[in-house]
Amino acid sequence: MRTTFIESLSQAASENPDIWLLCGDLGYSVLEPFAAKFPDRFINVGVAEQNMAGMAAGIALSGKTVFIYSIGNFPTLRCLEQLRNDVCYHGADVKVVAVGAGYAYGSQGYTHHALEDAGIMSMLPGIEVFVPCDPMEVRAATQLIAASGKPSYLRLSRQGEPNLGAAVSDLRKPRTLREGRDVIILASGPIASRALEAAGELALRGREVGVVSVSCLKPLDESAIRAVMRDASLIVTLEEHILRGGLFSLVASAFAGDARRPPIAGIGIPEQGGKTSIAGSREALLDAAGLSVPAIVARIEQSLAKR
Amino acid sequence: MVHAAKASHIGGCLSMADILAVLYTRILRIDPAEPQSPGRDRFVLSKGHATAIMYATLAECGFFSLDELGTYCRDGSIFTGHVSHAVPGVEVSTGSLGHGLPIAIGMALAARSRSAGSRVFCLLSDGECDEGSNWEGILFAPHHKLSNLCVIVDFNKIQSFGSVAEVLNLDPFAAKWKAFGWHVEEIDGHDVVALERVLGAVPAPSGRPTVVIAHTVKGKGVSFMENKLEWHYRSPSDELLAQALAEVGA
């Protein structure tokens, strides 16, 4: 995902001389192609995220489009008030790009796990939030935010993620990765690959399960998602994020008032306040958090049994 | 304005009044008829609580009519108690301290990339220099040789809940800026001749960003407000307003 992002951004920057990229002393072996091609529009600001975010606002308010890049919590939570006041309340054309979504940094520990970021960023006024599930969506998201003129958050995983579906036609709309009408899994981010595996397992048991990637968390295209949900008997949301504030919260609050709708079951990472994280690969940590494919299958079966 | 709105922060407004007067009459290349002109100089008020003096200055300069100041802090007014970019002539909204300098640095970088020759001035309070975000910026600006950037510190020695010396001492203040690589000017912040001299010398020939440490008096010009912490909060009564206006000759 990181490589696709920087390739897409370099392409956009070659067409738009007002695109700048700032990083907080991170991006080794990722950002070099941009830095080499556009040395006057690339700044490593140092390990100083508050200054990076405020500075990005100042550059953007001078007519530029500014991307800021770092790991998970650093360009988001560390400088949250700069993003709120200086970027969002001014409508500054700043794009926050975080790598290491969810457990992507595995054994590095909870400082490097981005588990609350999408929800917190979604709460900021006027920002658009994108959580792509595969490199094709990363490319579409980078192109979209480079031209949107709005504050944006782009949540990336790391590297090596496979493409999960057909070409992206409109990133703002839900993208069907697997057809199926009885149960619909709405997934955001690369965890969608586990949704596809779970859907395959459930199909073997006679369930008809569709998987839809919702990469644009804000603004949520409610009418398009409502159309996807229309004939389903169960909606499941799946995200590599805590349930509060993320995909489940956004979907549940959007459709809470619908008189006739299927139940909505949320699967995400349990809050872990007060506990330190264990070591492990992304896959192992997801499994431990109850997001293994068998656990997802079991959760869906339980929800179906309650219908 | 402060009296009518029963607002606060008059002490920190009076300490920087002379600085704004010199900036807006002698230094800044700005046009009230075209406040968004791309090549303009920028002024970022980082001590966003000192907003009454900011709005009054902009009105005096013709960005809007003096009559509009009567809505200050009133229901529905754009003239909020911390400075708002909804007001013509205000570059950015501030109020949470430690935000202005990084924004000003971004503006200085963008101005340099345009070769527009425009300068960016940023006014900090002394108490605000407790904020770590400022020191991130103070480290950054000399490294990138942002000579078109000028920081002014309204060094009135009194912050929100005590004196600077008691709360979190800044001394040796000038030496800190020098050690970070800034061109440092230390002056009496009520000496308008000195202010015009040092602000007019930006960008410094050394290629360094400039900091003007302006020694000021909180509540300057009003005997009962001078150097009094309480005037960070109080709003003057009718009698005290009359006395204050008489003392400053308004």
Image (cartoon, coloured by chain):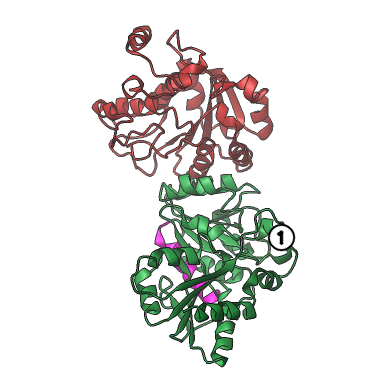
Q: Main secondary structure of the magenta part?
A: helix
x, y percent for residue B194: 50, 17
Mark 1 sits on what residue? A277
Query: Where is B51 relative to B102, above or below?
Result: above
Q: Please tell me which residue lies in front, B155 or A172.
A: A172
Residue, x 41% and y 33% (percent of image)? B82
Tell me the quarter of the picture where residue A239 sits.
bottom right
Q: Could you say whether the residue bearing mark 1 is in a helix, strand or loop?
A: loop
* Colour of the chain lettered B: red
Which residue corresponds to the image point at 38% horizontal and 15% vertical from the top-left? B236
In this rendered view, identify the residue nearer to me: A58 or A192: A192
Q: Residue at x 31, y 21 (%)?
A: B4
Left or right: B236 as drawn, with respect to A48: left
Residue B187 counted in the magenta span: no
Indicate left or right for A246 with B63 as reference. right
Question: In the rendered image of this protein, which colour is used for chain A?
Answer: green
Amino acid beneath label 1: Ser
Locate residue B242: give its quadrant: top left
Instruction: Specify start and end residues of the magenta stretch as a single range.
Output: A135-150
* Chain letter of the residue carrying label 1: A
Q: Estimate how packed mark 1 is, as few (under 14), some (14 to 19) or many (20 or more) residues with alpha carbons within 10 Å.
A: some
